[in-house]
Every structure is written in C-alpha cells, then in structure tokens.
Amino acid sequence: MAMGAEVVAGGAREEVLRRIRAAIGEGSAADAAEIRGGWQALPRSYKRTASLERAAILEMLEDRLRDYDASVVRVKAGEVGAEIARVLPARQAADGGAQGAGGGDRRIAAAGFEFVVDDGLTVAELDTFEA
C-alpha cells in the first residue's frame, strides 16, 4: 500500500470516529454543532403524509402481515383485550408482551397467561415471549 493511501484511509477512519464521538456526546461541542448542521442541511423532499386512505393502509398492513404467516383479526378498540384473552389459550402461550395493546388497556387478562407491557424491552427480551 502506498503511503498516500494510508494517510487517506487513516483520515477517513478518524473522521468516522470523530462523528461517532460527537454523536454520543464524547466529541467537542464544535464537532457536534458541525454534524448537527450537516444533518439539518440535508434536503427533506420525501413524502411526509400518507397518500392512501386509512382503510387502504389497514388493508395493506393486513396483506403484508399475512405474507409473513401472521393471523390477522380485526376488532374494535374496546374489544382488543377480549380478543387477546380468547386467542392466547387456543395457542397455548404462557406469556406475551405488547406495546400499547388494547388501546392502552394494561389490564388484559387471560387464564394462565402473564401479560407484560413493553415499556422499552430489548429485542432479546421480546424474543423470549411466546406471544
């Protein structure tokens, strides 16, 4: 490797590390401000609102979930807890976690089932649940 290539590679490495340090708060305030300014200068010309109606969005979601072999059941917001309590025993699941399940109702109960609300569980913790 030529000496010039080592300098360029080392410079790129140092720049990446500088940006990481600034992002996690270990860099200088000037580095953080420069990086923040760079992010703010990026063009944001992507769509920010849905172009489909709510019913079409739900239909698309259901279709995609079924592609992943998920069972999809539509219920009204006030019926989510009862539907979960109905389905879990049939699946013989012993525990499960959810975020915002039941429209925020954390009192979902099913016989022999431990319900845990996801208030920041890690992916590894979520993977341990049966449902």
Image (cartoon, rainbow, N blue to C red):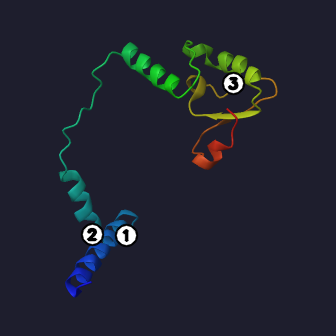
Q: What element carries label 3?
A: loop
Task: Give the alpha-carbon distance from disc 2 to disc 1, as whole Å.
Answer: 9 Å
| Rendered-image quadrant of the N terminus | bottom left
Q: Nearer the viewer, residue 33 or 58?
A: 58
Q: Are marks 2 and 1 in contact (CB under 8 Å)?
A: yes
Residue 89, picture quadrant: top right
Residue under the image location 77 percent in, 29 percent down = 113
Looking at the image, how many numbered discs can be counted on the residues? Answer: 3
Q: In this view, does 46 lie above or below 123?
A: above
Residue under the image location 29 percent in, 65 percent down = 32
Q: Nearer the viewer, residue 56 or 115?
A: 56
Residue under the image location 36 percent in, 66 percent down = 20
Q: Which of marks 1 and 2 precedes in the sequence?
A: 1
Q: Position of residue 121 (x, y in %)?
A: 60, 45
Name which residue type carries label 3: Ile
Q: Is mark 1 on a helix, strand or loop?
A: helix
Name which residue type carries label 1: Arg
| Rendered-image quadrant of the C terminus | top right
Q: Which of marks 2 and 3 precedes in the sequence?
A: 2
Q: Mark 1, residues whose alpha carbon is within 10 Å: few (<14), some, or many (≥20)?
A: some
Q: Is residue 19 visible?
A: yes
Q: Where is residue 92 in the image (x, y as percent from the top left)?
A: 77, 27
Mark number for residue 31? 2
Q: Where is residue 130 in the image (x, y as percent from the top left)?
A: 70, 35
Residue 88, picture quadrant: top right
Name which residue type carries label 2: Asp
Write down the residue under mark 3.
108
Mark number for residue 21? 1
Task: Give the alpha-carbon distance from disc 1 to disc 3, as whole Å.
Answer: 43 Å
